[in-house]
Image (cartoon, rainbow, N blue to C red):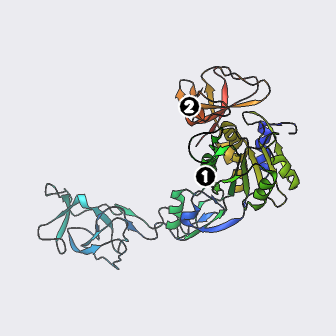
């Protein structure tokens, strides 16, 4: 391992190691979670015509009105003459000539059916007419054409994440597909002959915790994780797995140190990789690494201890995936500030990443370390909602710290 990279510099290097992936045109449901690659421009006014904002009756001119029919959503009536009314559902196009919508709860029909009945303004429950039973304020309960936007109006600029609401708005605005930055495909190689894929630990072997955990972290960051592949602890097997991984980012678990079965450095050097980060001045997770293969694929080595692996995900994977997704500044925007509620033992030389739980207190957001936060432990971080960044030599109670959010 070369000289350790300072933590903040390592995050910046990961962010600068990649640019956005190509733009693809995808159906609206598929676009959710991806980054919009072009402005969203309305192809039609919204609403595209005057529509009823409430269930009731579209009325024309002064009342009382003669009910001449019923309009359901999707139906159209060309014209409504003065003195006439038509029952109408919310969202239905108003006929020409309609002045207002009289809400159902404000309409009083005379006995004798619906069609051909006389309609007044009143209280249908008590059967009483209003003081002015033939008057409805013009424009009442109508959503006029273009109230939300005009055709050609910019609804969203490029660069934001497509949420379910954005997909719905795009559909309303006339889109069937959206141009988005293709989310990165992520291969996961689980290294370690001592790892079991099912059942409890036995016979000196332990259960693989990273294989089940890492895909969820990648999904949270906005990547598309392939099912984990377990790779034997040999250099030849690792070289073959790295060469075969058809992904934008390859995550490996373990093999980042210099033990007899740690072949990742040798494999990457043999493949001609460019080293971006080889060790970070952080605890836990010091031996994390990031390299780029000659064909442009990125390899991110997670340490084998679970909390150290999470440290590497937050330190290197988060900014790298954000860069591949085209999210400008998104990773930094997720960082929040909090105040430590207790004294924390700092590391004299390295940044310390510490699982914390947060709550709002008298001094703002307070961060309290969780128990069981050793490098090989997941119990503490499973109870945490953030990871505090403790600079070297600091950590006194009341100290302000940056907090990286957790899924």
- Is 352 situated left or right of 368 in this image? right
Rendered image: mark on residue 57: none
Specify few, some or many for label 2: CA neighbours under 10 Å numbering under 14, 14-19, or 20 or more.
some
Could you tell me residue 77's position as x and y percent? 33, 78
Q: Which residue is mark 2?
A: 358
- Tell me the quarter of the picture where residue 223 sits: bottom right
Quarter location, residue 70:
bottom left
> Which quarter of the figure is the C terminus placed in?
top right
Q: Is residue 223 above or below residue 63?
A: above
Which percent across, then down, holds residue 60?
A: 29, 71
Q: What residue did someone put label 1 on?
A: 219
**Residue at 31% of width from left, 64% of height from top?**
101
> How many labels sit on residues?
2
Between 104 and 14, the residue placed more toward the observer is: 14
Q: Nearer the viewer, mark 2 or mark 1?
A: 1
For label 1, the SS is helix
- Where residue 325 appears, as percent x and y from the top left, is 68, 56
Q: What element does badge 2 sit on?
A: strand
Vertical order, 58 against 359 (above or below): below
The Cα–Cα distance between marks 2 and 1, rounded to whole angstroms, is 23 Å
Q: Is residue 79 visible?
A: yes
**Which quarter of the picture shows residue 19?**
bottom right
Viewer-proximal residue among 354 and 373: 373
Image coordinates for residue 54, horizontal then vertical, percent: 33, 61
Residue 297 visible in the displayed image: no
Tell me the crowding category of disc 1: few under 14, some 14 to 19, or many 20 or more residues within 10 angstroms, Cα based. Answer: some
Residue most extreme to the left? 111
Q: Quadrant of the N terminus?
A: top right
In terms of sequence position, does the residue under pointer 2 or pointer 1 come before the other?
1
């Amino acid at each position: 391992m070369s000289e350790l990279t300072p933590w903040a510099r390592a995050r910046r290097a990961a962010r600068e190691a990649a640019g956005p992936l190509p733009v693809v045109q995808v159906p609206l449901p598929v676009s959710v979670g991806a980054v919009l690659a072009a402005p969203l421009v309305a192809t039609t006014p919204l609403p595209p015509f005057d529509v009823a904002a409430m269930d009731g009756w579209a009325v024309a001119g002064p009342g009382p009105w003669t009910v001449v029919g019923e309009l359901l959503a999707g139906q159209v009536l060309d014209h409504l003459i003065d003195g006439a009314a038509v029952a109408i559902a919310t969202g239905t196009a108003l006929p020409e000539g309609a002045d207002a919508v009289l809400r159902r709860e404000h309409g009083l029909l005379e006995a004798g059916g619906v069609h051909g009945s006389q309609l007044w303004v009143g209280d249908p429950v008590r059967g009483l007419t209003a003081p002015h039973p033939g008057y409805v304020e013009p424009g009442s309960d109508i959503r006029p054409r273009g109230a939300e936007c005009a055709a050609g109006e910019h609804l969203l600029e490029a660069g934001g994440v497509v949420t379910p609401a954005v997909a719905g708005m795009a559909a309303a605005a006339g889109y069937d597909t959206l141009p988005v930055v293709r989310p990165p495909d992520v291969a996961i190689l689980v290294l370690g002959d001592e790892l079991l894929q099912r059942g409890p630990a036995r016979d000196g072997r332990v259960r693989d915790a990273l294989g089940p955990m890492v895909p969820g972290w990648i999904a949270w960051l906005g990547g598309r994780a392939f099912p984990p592949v377990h790779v034997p602890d040999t250099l030849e097997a690792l070289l073959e797995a790295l060469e075969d991984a058809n992904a934008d980012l390859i995550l490996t678990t373990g093999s980042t140190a210099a033990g007899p079965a740690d072949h990742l450095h040798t494999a990457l050097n043999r493949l001609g990789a460019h080293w971006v980060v080889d060790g970070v001045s952080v605890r836990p997770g010091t031996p994390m690494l990031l390299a780029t293969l000659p064909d442009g694929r990125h390899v991110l080595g997670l340490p084998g201890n679970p909390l150290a692996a999470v440290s590497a995900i937050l330190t290197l994977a988060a900014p790298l995936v954000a860069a591949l997704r085209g999210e400008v500044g998104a990773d930094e925007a997720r960082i929040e500030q909090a105040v430590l509620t207790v004294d924390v033992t700092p590391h004299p030389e390295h940044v310390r990443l510490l699982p914390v739980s947060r709550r709002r207190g008298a001094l703002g957001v307070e961060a309290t370390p969780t128990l069981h936060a050793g490098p090989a432990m997941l119990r503490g971080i499973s109870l945490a909602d953030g990871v505090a960044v403790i600079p070297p030599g600091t950590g006194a109670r009341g100290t302000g710290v940056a907090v990286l959010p957790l899924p």
